[in-house]
Amino acid sequence: MTIDENIICEIQNWKPSQLFSYGTAGFRARANLLPPVVFRCGILAAARALSVPCVCVGLMITASHNPSEDNGVKIIEPDGSMLDEKWERIASKLINSENPREILQELCFEENVCWTTDSKSIRPAVYVGYDSRESSEPLSRLVEQAVKLMGLKYKCFGRVTTPQLHYFVKVANEDGIQANKENYFQRLSMGWDILSQYAFADNSESENVFRVVDCANGVGHEAMQDLTHFTKIDNIVCVNTGNGELNKHCGADFIQKNTVFPIISDPFHIKSIPSNALVHFCSLDGDADRLVYFIPEKTEYSSLSGSSNQRVRVLEGDRLSVLAAIVVKKFLDLLQSNLSVGVIQTAYANGASTQFLKDLGKPIQVECVSTGVKHLERAARRYDIGIFWEANGHGTILFSENAKSFLRKIIESTTGQKKNAALCLLALSSIANQATGDAICNFVLAESLLKVMGWQDLVSWESLYQDLPNCYKALHVQNKELIQTTDQERKVTAPHSLSVVMKNLSESNPSYRFLVRPSGTENIVRLYGEGPSLPTLKCLMEQIETVVLQACGTPES
Ligand code: 16G
Ligand code: MG
């Protein structure tokens, strides 16, 4: 097939000045380097949409928790999940190619992409969304150019969170629903209302719980505003709503990595909270796909707004998994079902959480997979109910069609406790984003799970188990790619010197666990360790650090 020369010519005009690779979460770089990448990604998203029968694919412009000068782009599959791995490779090839004609032709033959732009048949659409970065909206206009050049429909949702766009793409393809923010929030609201009717331990009006949400000065704030409009959840106080810099000293990634209270750029919001209130603090990241809760060491909330470096105890993704697993099990036990339930973690999950989950017993099964949402999601989909969270706060509960139809049958055929339990589980499936991990949905989820458990303060949740002391480090090296791992990243296979040291250290310190892996998003090597004594752990980690630096080289200054 001949490819429209206009397309080839335009793609050739947009050539990145450096090599890019489609990483764990798409392409990311300083925003000024991105226009050619984004244009070519628009072409690629269109090609992906043409390669399978579908209503649309998605393209999101965001650099998530990264600094505001950065930006990025990622493509969403028709089912709302992350881009297929084969297409990740195609994306890297097309973005860097000197000879795009060859790649486009390959796509014709190998992926059935029909490049003619004069087709009378209905063309799919590319759904586009972007975060609150200054560079985002201008970049979206390049996507528009690319998509229209390909003769596809372009539908822009403007500023949305990443998970909202995943959701829009999924429901447009699977349910044929006109995707919009309204039905996204209505599902959340419906789930909350059902749980509040059938499961909340305490529904008193006089509830003294306040929910402070650090919005990282990002697009999550707009979604939180919509949430308060659409749902009956009270006492939500949003901070870092956009006066300060995106992700700077605030947001889920900052809190999780630094375990300090965020700097709040609009402290007047927090000052209105009564001094005797019970406060739930949580943080979204810049595109609102991660959420972590935290408990400040100091409890006078009104004095917490400044740059006090006040330490916090973080309730990471693991804790959300545990809370979700307890409640799912509680309802399922009432149903006596055979539904399988998997909890998927990565090697970063604190060992105490893994043990706690294993001790919950049937039907909970625990699995460890490699870092990256796509691995967790894939594993979670193998269960009737798949609960997955990364420690960094990304996760959700996925319900299979089998699980949902089983629950619907129970609702139709029984009464009393059983019927209520099934209703509550279905309500959870309407709160948890079924396309991808979603901080806004997970905020509603966590708040409802806490109410199901009857826990007003976060300490009850925290006291389920005690995290093993742990230590985390990021190392700048010359060549991170020298490090290779196996067994879901839990064992190092290369370089040899490092694998030997790690094997010996693990054998002589069986109650300690270490993890060394090259980051998929930054030019660093990440070290993680945990064990009963922090001083011993730090000493052992120093030994590993020395070997990593020797093996991978210290960066030239
Ligand atoms: C990205 C991934 C996240 C992963 C992280 C690892 C998505 C949506 N996000 O943020 O799942 O944990 O990268 O980063 O896939 P690292 O490779 O730098 O440790
Ligand atoms: Mg994010």
Image (cartoon, rainbow, N blue to C red):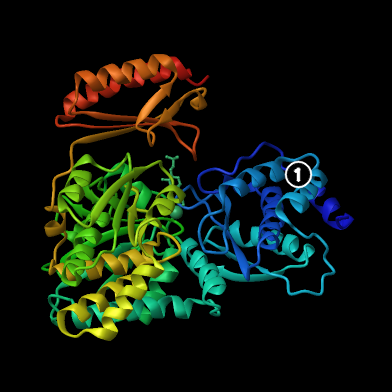
**Is 132 or 204 nearer to us in this picture?**
204
Residue at 48%, 76% in the rendered image: 181
User: Is residue 82 shown left or right of residue 32?
Assistant: left
Position of 226 relative to 245 (above/below)? below
User: Is residue 99 shown left or right of residue 475?
Assistant: right
Q: Quadrant of residue 232?
A: bottom left
Residue 69, image x and y in percent? 55, 48
Residue at 70%, 45% in the rendered image: 95
Position of 211 relative to 297 (above/below)? below
Tell me which amino acid carries mark 1: Lys
Residue at 34%, 32% in the rendered image: 490
Position of 133 relative to 110 (above/below)? below
Can see residue 413? yes
Q: Give ligand 2's quarter of the image.
A: bottom left
Residue 555, image x and y in percent? 50, 21
Residue 471, image x and y in percent? 26, 33
Q: Quadrant of residue 429?
A: bottom left
Residue at 82%, 70% in the rendered image: 119
Residue 406, image x and y in percent? 32, 74
User: Is residue 303 shown left or right of residue 521?
Assistant: left
Residue bearing mark 1: 15
Q: Quadrant of the N terminus?
A: bottom right
Q: Element under label 1? A: loop
**Is 342 or 308 nearer to us in this picture?**
342
